[in-house]
Image: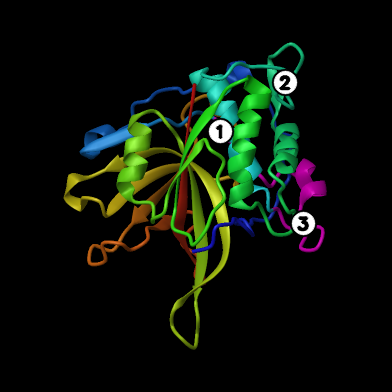
């Protein structure tokens, strides 16, 4: 299993503008959903906003060789930080955070994404190394907020390099990992490995990766640890602030019942391509004081 994130999911850009968000507009409108009446267990942490890696103002940071956006990691991390400042208020709104206005009323998400891309050492052609991401998260929490983090990093790999605040579990993430984190109110940073079928060997072959935030789930006891509906914030899409409802994609996490150690694959909007399949390669769970 690869231990880096590269070549994030790409969509064509359209006519949309800079991502300046007003903190007072950002809300978790309700934690209730009809899923709570339709499933045995449901958690909704999602809010009414999202950030995109595809904004035209970010084009100077698209790949100089490919012309494509590989900013899924800094965009997902930016969305997570804005969520913790505006929604949970576990992080203070501070002008130490790039993009936050001096009067602390707005944030230019693009300014934060750009700065995070530098701190996380994002390669604009190939993406962000996940070892660098672990260091980046700790540095950002300390520099911007004066806080320490404890990270649970679940990824099956031959070798990773972790700071001392990261606990590494060398295995495939499973459905219970996602459920338990969100029961504690902790959104998850998910990473998929894109694979295609090799026409000769008929086996899956890794091609690239993508990172997104997971902000809710619905679970049915009948499916045990084999199927979960997820609410995700996919940075490859264009999101607007809603006054009516939370904004997210519904996708399904599926594991083969006959293979106990098999990887979860994701199916749904943006993940059911005709040529490639996204397998959940890593889960990053952030907690902080």
Label 2, label 1: how far apart the Cα atoms are: 16 Å
Mostly what secondary structure, the magenta segment? loop
Q: Dot 2: within a 10 Å radius of its alpha carbon, few (fewer than 14), some, or many (20 or more) residues?
A: few
Taking the spot 56% from the left edge, 33% from the top edge, the residue there is 80
Tag of residue 96: 2
Q: Position of residue 208 (x, y in %)?
A: 58, 63
Tag of residue 80: 1
Considering only vertical position in the picture, is 54 above or below 3?
above
Instruction: Please tell me how many numbered marks the rendered image carries.
Output: 3
Taking the spot 37% from the left edge, 25% from the top edge, the residue there is 31
Q: Which residue is mark 3?
A: 63
Taking the spot 52% from the left edge, 35% from the top edge, the residue there is 165
Q: Position of residue 286 (x, y in %)?
A: 48, 34
Tag of residue 53: none
Q: Position of residue 141 (x, y in %)?
A: 61, 27
* Image position of 221 (left or right of 76): left
Q: Nearer the viewer, residue 173 or 230?
A: 173
Q: Nearer the viewer, residue 255 or 288?
A: 288
Considering only vertical position in the picture, is 58 above or below 269?
above
**Tag nearer the camera, 2 or 3:** 2
Q: What range of the chain is rendered magenta?
A: 49-69
Labelled pair 3, 1 in contact (Cβ < 8 Å): no
Q: Nearer the viewer, residue 137 or 36?
A: 137
């Amino acid at each position: 299993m690869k231990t880096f994130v590269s070549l994030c999911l790409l969509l064509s850009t359209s006519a949309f503008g800079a991502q300046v968000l007003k903190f007072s507009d950002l809300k978790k409108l309700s934690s209730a959903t009809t899923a709570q009446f339709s499933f045995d267990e449901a958690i909704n942490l999602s809010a009414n906003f999202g950030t995109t890696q595809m904004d035209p103002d970010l084009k100077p940071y698209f790949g100089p060789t490919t012309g494509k956006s590989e900013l899924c990691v800094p965009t997902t991390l930016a969305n997570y930080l804005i969520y913790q400042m505006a929604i949970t208020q576990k992080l203070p709104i501070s002008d130490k955070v790039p993009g936050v206005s001096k009067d602390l009323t707005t944030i230019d998400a693009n300014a934060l994404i750009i700065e995070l891309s530098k701190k996380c050492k994002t390669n604009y052609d190939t993406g962000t190394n996940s070892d660098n991401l672990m260091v980046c998260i700790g540095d950002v929490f300390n520099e911007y907020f004066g806080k320490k983090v404890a990270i649970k990093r679940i990824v099956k790999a031959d070798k990773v390099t972790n700071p001392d605040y990261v606990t590494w579990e060398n295995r495939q993430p499973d459905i219970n990992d996602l459920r338990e984190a969100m029961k504690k109110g902790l959104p998850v940073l998910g990473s998929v490995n894109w694979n295609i079928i090799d026409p000769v060997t008929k086996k899956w072959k890794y091609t690239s990766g993508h990172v997104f935030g997971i902000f809710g789930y619905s679970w049915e006891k009948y499916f045990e640890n084999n199927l979960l509906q997820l609410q995700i914030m996919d940075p490859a899409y264009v999101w607007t602030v809603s006054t009516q409802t939370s904004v997210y994609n519904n996708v399904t996490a599926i594991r083969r019942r006959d293979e106990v150690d098999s990887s979860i694959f994701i199916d749904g909007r943006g993940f059911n391509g005709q040529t490639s399949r996204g397998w959940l390669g890593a889960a990053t769970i952030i907690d902080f004081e």
